[in-house]
Amino acid sequence: MATGTKVFDYVIRDKQGALVKGRLEAPNQAAVAGRLKTMGVSAVSISEVQSTGLQREITIPGFGEKITLKHLAIMARQLATMINAGLSLLRSVSILAEQTESKPLAKILGQVRSDVETGAAFSVALGRHPETFPPLMINMVKAGEIGGFLDQVLVSVAENFEDEVKLRGKIKSAMTYPVVVFVIAILATTGMLLFIVPVFAGMFTSLGGELPLPTKILMQMSVGVKWGAIPTVVALGVFGAWWAKHKNDRSVRELLDPWKLKAPVFGNLFRKIAVARFTRNFGAMIHAGVPILQALDIVGETSGNIVIERATKAVQESVRSGKSLSGPLAEHKVFPPMVVQMMAVGEDTGALDTMLAKIAEFYDQEVEATTEQLTSLIEPLMIVVLGSVIGGMVIAMYMPIFGIFDLIQ
């Protein structure tokens, strides 16, 4: 949230008299009312969203300028509200370009507005910025333009992105504590090996005598860390730079993605995340009227896992040859039998989009439950490991002291 702004929930009435809810960031309620007035609507109610300090986003100068999925979700929902209220697409995009809190997004929306002014379709204008607008959003908007229900499609896009943001937030919040403990363990161990153990090593050497084996091992580890710390940091930096550049390369994903689904402890979580993302995106596109072959091509790319992408290719071939959609999925272990059976029922009843939405909702809940279980399991394990490592090092350092009087005599 930008400095000095607050979040407000508002309720307006559309042209049909139905109540429409939304959310805006603004300095005060008057500013919200003013923005809604520029949209051609009047607010029924405006209320500030109360949040604690822990829930507020921290903006650091030079950071946070990236366009996130949250920005796109807010943009889609506000655009849907304005179009539903009777504003023209061009005017709606112009208002968004002026009021959005993200400067990079405001700049791109300005370019989109210019393209629309020159006669380009909205989906075409969005498609000229593939680094900002995902293929999922572009194709759903295109389907909404063709079908004449762009506002409904934009609401569906917003809900899809909001669910994805919520899913990511749950995973991040669940994994924060174990990661912090792991980093602290590494820093504490490295600090002891670099600064504390050498002091004891010098004292033991001056006294002479035979040191216990654990102490010898600890001293050798201290020497190894001392000489290997800088090369290790450099190597990690080089690897981080390489990973940032090549992590999405096809060859890297071919090796990594299958392993992620089979990884111990976390493999089941990765699979549930992939299935939730696939079913949610696929259901949203089918509901928006995107042709099924085109939808499969897009959801395969946006699933985040190459194993899912391969499965969608097999499904495409099946559909092209006039066969069922769910049949080929049964041959891929990444899809549980329940998912295959529910999709088959959706095909038979003509409610595939509804069934996919239910599957996505179920797996979102499964991901949340799995992350909570992993957190409850990992937290005590991390504490035990951290205590064992630090405690073992302390014992190894003090073992020679038990025989120090013998060495002095």
Image (cartoon, helix red, strand yellow):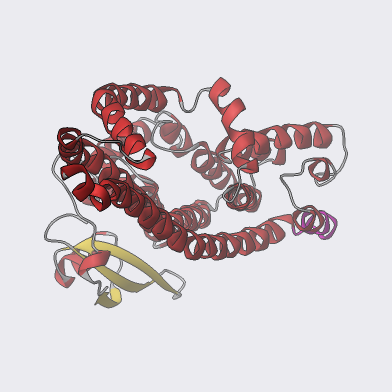
Residue 337 visible? The answer is yes
Q: Is residue 294 above or below residue 144?
A: above
Front-most of 298 and 197? 197
- Which residue sits at x=77%, y=37%? 315
Quadrant where the C terminus is found in the figure: top left
Which quadrant would residue 362 be assigned to in this image? bottom right
Residue 111 visible? The answer is no
Quadrant where the N terminus is found in the figure: bottom left
Q: Is residue 333 above or below residue 352?
A: above
- Which residue sits at x=64%, y=59%? 357
| Residue lying furthest front | 409
Q: Is residue 253 above or below residue 49?
A: above
User: Is 223 left or right of 251, judged from the image as shown?
Assistant: left
Front-most of 398 and 227? 398
Front-most of 343 and 235? 235
Front-most of 344 and 196? 196
Across and down, in percent, residue 272 comes to 62, 53
User: Is 134 left or right of 212, judged from the image as shown?
Assistant: right
Across and down, in percent, residue 70 comes to 37, 52
Which quadrant would residue 61 be assigned to in this image? top left
Across and down, in percent, residue 27 comes to 14, 64
Across and down, in percent, residue 29 comes to 18, 72
Total marks shown come to 0
Instruction: Tell me if residue 212 is in the magenta stretch.
Output: no
The magenta region covers 342-351
Magenta residues, dominant SS class: helix
Instruction: Tell me if residue 343 is in the magenta stretch.
Output: yes
- Which residue sits at x=26%, y=44%? 187
